[in-house]
Image (cartoon, rainbow, N blue to C red):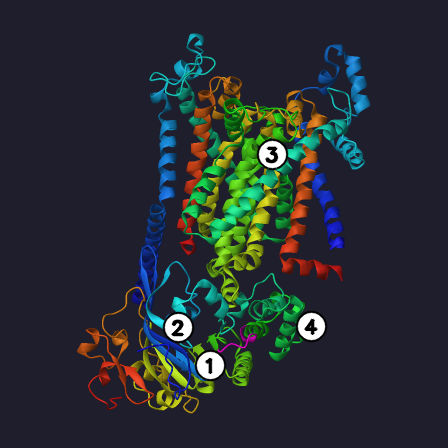
């Protein structure tokens, strides 16, 4: 049980989150954002974290940098191990040292993620200055190289964010994230705010750079298409829990959880243009007032009596594939 | 067909009514949750009650106005809670009656400003174009002079009676309201329900009064509260420098002005009237802040 | 940038002229015959007519206004009814005192108000922050003249530390007037800074900065401060006008021989040219300070600066 001991034969684990619980506590309500999340990312691999808005994805991501908004956001329990070191036990100084260096994050909305009063060059260089301990000039020089790398002419480093388009801003955000060559890249819906054509470019860029620098990545998205393109493994989040996890193949071809199935049913099928979409019925539960038992049971077509009573346990169906659903509690057979 | 229409209209009517009520209630509950705002409301209601029942609390002619030299400069005591002034008048009586002047002139001036400025702003914002330009440039010129100075100039030219004072302060605040209402109207103007009203042939006046102004009501009320505080402050400031309410009429500002001379030896003479101004302004500021927060759920 | 400033300076001229017109019109309604004031006991029908002709008072309103502005452009504010001396000389003698008090008050507002506002905005749930919020509310509710009287009571009458009137004691005599005049606006600036800091600190780009590993102090200084200053600068700009209005009160309370007192004295003596002169010079001050605020804006916000830059081409 000693966390520090790493088995030499096993592949290195970049990130391990165990049973993470995060609630936002304000005067009159408690938002149960994350309710026992388990995540593991091996070195050089990409995990897709998929779920609807409000499933606790962003909160989970922020907790890796220990940046859950204070003072409402409280990490109540769980463990976050970054290359074996507990993030939650780190001092503010240690945290500042890993943020932007070991772990970097690409944020959802490039429009608001850049400081309007600093040039993009300065904003990229800042990260280099902090972590590489180089002079301002040197940092600016590297920042310009970084801009070129993400496909922006280096002359534009003296310009301000408002002079850039949305796609260009997201490239700048990516440049900021990648500039110190992090071991773990967290991409929080990096393409949601962009046009479809720009989305593809940005995604391609992230993927190329990730492979070039052998980074691990946590790709947060609600777009299964993106998952299929860039991820090695997939975790499906629902109401602050990981309800199904597996390799790309496990999830896409052998999905087990009714919610996962619902997600795929909701995708338009290009081969059958006339068929109607089948959205998952109902809405995401109110995180201040989660249903008892399995949080999905009110929307589930397969709900049984037991589902409203107890939370299903995590059931490993194979080496790589696990699911949290009462349908599989007693049996290994697929019922879907 | 009739049935469907009836169902549609009644349901919509029911929904609208239900929604309207709950929105006001929602604002009220949010307001009550803000302790400072409630304190402001309580203080302000108290001051208003004092002003209304002033004659019951202290006689105007007998205590607030009549000079009683043997009684002069008595320190606060059971008989005179706030003491007596340099002419032997009860300070408490003068403050109580002064509340009437401050509140009436303050509210009247802002009502004037709201009416005139609001009308100009609504016209400018709704019609736009050249008319907007002309009106707003004129208002900008007035905004170049601070309200105390503008009111001061008007009072200096026209004399310092109560009506002139009210109009002077009202005029000083007019440009602020025209700007406020104009920007509110401009934002509401483009919204669909106004377009819809125009599409069914409503007149401009009808649209401005029934649709546009009603929806600007909230933010305007907040500003009204804060500007009433400012107006009351302006009255007492003008009275303090001798260009507002004139002696012997009791007014908080002129009480401070006449008491100033004696304050080195009788400090209490300037404490109570100043406190009265301070509490009034504070209560209105608290009220205005509370209203603003209650109206804007975002700021929760 | 220079071109912009020059352009704005020229744009000020019609505004100042319009203000002059408004003030001139209001003062036109001052009742009574000015020659009564000018001549006093020597008033005769003939002398009155002579003075009126001499000062151009017998001409129509528009002609008088035209003459006044024509002289004003050359820096001539006319002749005082009372002292018979040029109004400009009096303004020149008195205005520096006013300016010193206003600038002192401004300095006090900014130096005290901004840091407190920033700190309490960065730590919005702390005891300090709640205290400053309450103090701010109390502060904006203080009437200037009452605060002035209270300060005199405490620091001159009771403690005897500072002079209560006049300017004879140099720096010491400016402290209380600046505190009295600035107290109110300090509270206001503090509140605005606090709320804009609260707003800025939860922006996405602050999160980006933190995720880069920027130290907490630098997040505030390098990333939040400049962004949060814009509303504060607006308020400072608007407050200059209010401060100039308040200076009339401060100068009365502390018996300072400044423009504000001159204005009051002139109103009481019906010395219309001096009244107009005082109001015009204050309006010019406000116009200039608005221009300065606009320039500072451009330095704080690159978006505005770029607009000016575009105007240059």
Dominant secondary structure, magenta: loop
Decide: few, some or many residues near mark 2? Use Cα within 10 Å; few <14, some 14-19, many ≥20. Answer: many
Which dot, 3 or 1, sits closer to the camera? 1
Helix, strand or loop for disc 1: strand
Q: Is residue C173 above or below residue A255?
A: above
**In this rendering, does residue B141 appear at all?**
yes
- Give the Cα distance between marks 3 and 1: 63 Å
Decide: few, some or many residues near mark 3? Use Cα within 10 Å; few <14, some 14-19, many ≥20. Answer: many
Q: Residue at x 54, y 59 (%)?
A: C218
Look at mark 3 in the image and give the residue it sits on: C245
Q: Chain of mark 1?
A: A
- Give the Cα distance between marks 3 and 4: 50 Å
Do marks 1 and 4 both belong to one polypeptide chain?
Answer: yes
Instruction: Locate residue C76: give its quadrant.
Output: top right
| Mark found first going from the N terminus, 1 or 4 | 4
Look at mark 4 in the image and give the residue it sits on: A155
**In this rendering, does residue C21 appear at all?**
no
Look at mark 1 in the image and give the residue it sits on: A216
Horizontally, is B72 left or right of A260 in the view?
Answer: right
CB under 8 Å between discs 1 and 4: no
Q: Chain of mark 2?
A: A
- Give the Cα distance between marks 1 and 2: 17 Å
Q: Residue at x 45, y 44 (%)?
A: C132
């Amino acid at each position: 049980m000693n966390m520090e001991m790493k088995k030499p034969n096993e592949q290195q684990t970049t990130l391990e989150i165990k049973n993470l619980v995060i609630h936002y506590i304000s005067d009159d309500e408690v938002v149960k954002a994350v309710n026992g999340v388990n995540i593991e990312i091996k070195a050089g691999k990409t995990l897709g974290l998929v779920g609807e808005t409000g499933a606790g994805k962003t909160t989970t991501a922020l907790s890796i940098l220990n940046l859950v908004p204070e003072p409402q956001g409280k990490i109540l329990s769980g463990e976050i191990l970054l290359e074996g070191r507990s993030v939650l036990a780190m001092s503010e100084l240690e945290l500042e040292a890993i943020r932007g260096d070991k772990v970097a994050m690409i944020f959802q909305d490039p429009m608001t993620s850049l400081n309007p009063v600093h040039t993009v060059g300065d904003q990229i260089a800042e990260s280099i200055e902090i972590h590489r301990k180089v002079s301002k000039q040197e940092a600016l020089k590297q920042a310009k190289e970084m801009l070129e790398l993400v496909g922006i002419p280096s002359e534009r480093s003296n310009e301000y964010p408002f002079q850039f388009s949305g796609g260009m801003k997201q490239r700048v955000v990516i440049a900021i994230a990648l500039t110190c060559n992090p071991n773990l890249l967290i991409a929080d819906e990096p393409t949601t705010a962009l046009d479809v054509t720009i989305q593809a470019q940005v995604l391609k860029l992230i993927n190329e750079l990730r492979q070039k620098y052998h980074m691990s990545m946590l790709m947060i998205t609600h777009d299964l298409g993106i998952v299929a393109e860039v991820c090695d493994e997939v975790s499906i989040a629902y109401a602050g829990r990981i309800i199904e996890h597996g390799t790309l193949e496990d999830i896409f071809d052998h999905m087990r959880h009714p919610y996962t199935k619902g997600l795929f049913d909701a995708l338009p099928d290009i081969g059958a243009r006339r068929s109607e979409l089948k959205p998952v019925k109902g809405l995401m539960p109110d995180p201040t007032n989660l249903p008892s038992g399995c949080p999905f049971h009110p929307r589930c077509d397969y709900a049984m009596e037991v589902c409203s009573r107890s939370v299903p346990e995590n059931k490993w169906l194979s080496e790589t594939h696990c699911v949290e659903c009462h349908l599989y509690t007693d049996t290994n057979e697929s019922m879907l | 067909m009739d049935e469907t229409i009836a169902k549609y209209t009644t349901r919509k009517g029911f929904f609208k009514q239900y929604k309207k009520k709950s929105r006001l209630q929602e604002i009220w509950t949010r307001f009550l949750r803000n302790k400072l705002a409630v304190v402001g409301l309580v203080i302000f209601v108290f001051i208003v009650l004092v002003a209304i029942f002033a004659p019951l609390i202290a006689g105007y002619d007998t205590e607030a106005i009549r000079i009683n030299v043997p009684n002069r400069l008595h320190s606060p005591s059971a008989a005179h809670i706030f003491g007596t002034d340099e002419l032997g008048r009860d300070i408490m009586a003068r403050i109580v009656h002064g509340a009437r002047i401050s509140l009436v002139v303050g509210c009247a001036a802002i009502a004037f400003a709201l009416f005139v400025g609001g009308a100009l702003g609504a016209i400018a914002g709704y019609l736009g174009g050249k008319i907007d330009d002309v009106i707003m440039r004129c208002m900008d010129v007035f905004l170049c002079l601070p309200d105390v100075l503008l009111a001061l100039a008007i009072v200096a030219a026209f004399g310092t009676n109560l009506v002139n004072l009210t109009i002077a302060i009202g005029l000083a605040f007019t440009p602020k309201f025209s700007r406020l209402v104009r920007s509110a109207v401009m934002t509401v103007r483009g919204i669909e329900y106004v377009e819809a009203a125009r599409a069914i042939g409503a007149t401009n006046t009808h649209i401005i009064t029934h649709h546009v102004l009603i929806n600007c009501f909230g933010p305007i009320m907040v500003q009204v509260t804060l500007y009433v505080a400012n107006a009351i402050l302006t009255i007492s400031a003008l009275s303090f420098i001798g260009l507002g309410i004139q002696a012997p009429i009791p007014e908080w500002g002129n009480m401070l002005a006449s008491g100033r001379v004696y304050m080195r030896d009788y400090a209490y003479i300037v404490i109570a009237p100043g406190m009265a101004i301070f509490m009034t302004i504070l209560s209105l500021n608290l009220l205005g802040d509370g209203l603003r927060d209650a109206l804007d759920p975002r700021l929760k | 940038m220079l071109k912009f400033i020059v352009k704005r300076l020229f744009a000020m001229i019609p505004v100042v002229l319009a203000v002059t017109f408004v003030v001139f019109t209001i003062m036109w309604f001052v009742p009574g015959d000015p020659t009564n004031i000018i001549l006093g006991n020597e008033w005769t029908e003939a002398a009155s007519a002579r003075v009126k002709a001499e000062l151009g008072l017998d001409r129509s309103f528009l002609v008088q206004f035209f003459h006044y502005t024509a002289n004003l452009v050359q820096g001539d504010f006319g002749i005082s009814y009372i002292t018979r001396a040029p109004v400009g000389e009096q303004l020149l003698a008195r205005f520096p005192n006013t300016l010193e008090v206003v600038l002192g008050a401004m300095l006090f507002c900014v130096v005290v108000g901004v840091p407190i506002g920033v700190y309490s905005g960065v730590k919005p749930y702390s005891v300090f922050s709640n205290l400053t919020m309450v103090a701010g509310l109390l502060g904006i509710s203080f009437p200037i003249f009452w605060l002035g009287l209270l300060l005199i009571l405490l620091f001159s009458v009771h403690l005897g530390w500072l002079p209560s009137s006049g300017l004879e004691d140099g720096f010491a005599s400016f402290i209380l007037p600046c505190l009295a005049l600035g107290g109110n606006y300090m509270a206001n600036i503090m509140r605005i800074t606090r709320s804009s800091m609260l707003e800025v600190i939860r922006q996405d780009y602050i999160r980006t900065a933190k995720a880069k590993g920027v130290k907490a102090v630098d997040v505030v200084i390098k990333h939040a401060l400049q962004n949060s200053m814009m509303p504060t600068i607006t308020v400072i700009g608007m407050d200059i006008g209010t401060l100039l209005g308040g200076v009339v009160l401060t100068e009365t309370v502390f018996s300072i021989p400044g423009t504000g007192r001159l204005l009051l004295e002139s109103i009481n003596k019906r010395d219309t040219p001096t009244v107009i002169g005082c109001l015009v010079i204050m309006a010019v001050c406000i116009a200039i300070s608005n221009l300065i605020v606009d320039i500072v804006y451009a330095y704080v916000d690159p978006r505005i600066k770029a607009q000016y830059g575009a105007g240059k081409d």
